[in-house]
Image (spheres, rainbow, N blue to C red):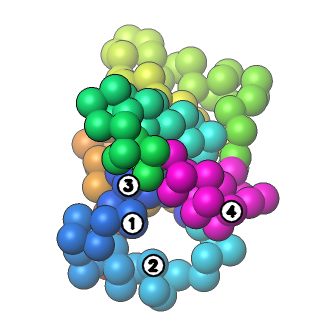
């Protein structure tokens, strides 16, 4: 089972950013084995709101993609950030402080025994979370 990091979700929207490795990995992976963290939904929505401030049309298109494609495609496979996951996340912040949302995604993966699919391996390596980089590992 795989937890897609936000960068994978973003790249899937734009084929020119996805690259052959990601496309191959997605094509060879059962969609029912792919999950999202609610934290990734937060990150993408923040991106849509920020984009709307600069370019309303593009921001609206991103918001529509979230609503009509992401939430629909991953219905039943979006994992909430709950109290047990928060308890698992806290130790990531002592003594070091990784990016908070990455730590939340990492804790979600550990709590549910998922492998994170990401291009951002450095932060997840430090937290000891199983990961796969489809751009280089696939």
Q: Are marks 1 and 3 in contact (CB under 8 Å)?
A: yes
Q: CA distance from mark 3 to mark 4?
A: 16 Å
| 56 to 120, vertically: above or below | above
Q: Which residue is mark 4?
A: 72
Q: Are marks 1 and 2 in contact (CB under 8 Å)?
A: yes
Quadrant into which the C terminus falls:
bottom left
Q: What are the residue bounds of the magenta stretch?
A: 63-78
Foreground of the two, 7 or 46: 46
Q: Are marks 2 and 4 in contact (CB under 8 Å)?
A: no
Q: Is residue 75 left or right of residue 63?
A: right
Q: CA distance from mark 2 to mark 4?
A: 17 Å
Q: Secondary structure at mark 4?
A: helix
Q: Which residue is mark 1?
A: 12
Q: Residue 43's spot in the image, x, y percent?
A: 46, 35
For marks 1 and 2 on the same chain, the one whose residue lies earlier in the sequence:
1
Q: Is residue 102 visible?
A: no
Foreground of the two, 94 or 5: 5
Q: Secondary structure at mark 3?
A: helix
Q: Is residue 90 left or right of residue 71?
A: left
Q: CA distance from mark 2 to mark 3?
A: 14 Å
Q: Which mark is residue 26?
A: 2
Q: Which mark is residue 10?
A: 3
Q: Residues within 10 Å of mark 2 (few under 14, many from 20)?
A: some
| 45 to 84, vertically: above or below | below
Q: Residue at x 53, y 20 (%)?
A: 91
Q: Residue 59's spot in the image, x, y percent?
A: 39, 41
* Residue 83, quarter of the rendered image: top right
């Amino acid at each position: 089972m795989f937890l897609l990091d936000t960068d994978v979700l973003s790249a899937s929207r734009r084929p020119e950013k996805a690259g052959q490795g990601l496309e191959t990995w997605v094509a060879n992976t059962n969609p029912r084995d792919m999950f999202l963290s609610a934290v990734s939904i937060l990150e993408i929505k923040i991106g849509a709101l920020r984009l709307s401030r600069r370019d309303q049309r593009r921001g609206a298109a991103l918001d529509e993609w979230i609503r009509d494609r992401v939430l629909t495609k991953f219905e039943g496979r979006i994992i909430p950030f709950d109290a047990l996951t928060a308890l698992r996340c806290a130790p990531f912040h002592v003594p070091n402080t990784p990016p908070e949302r990455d730590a939340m995604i990492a804790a979600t993966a550990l709590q549910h025994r998922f492998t994170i699919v990401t291009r951002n391996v450095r932060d997840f390596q430090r937290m000891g979370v199983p990961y796969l980089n489809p751009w280089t590992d696939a």
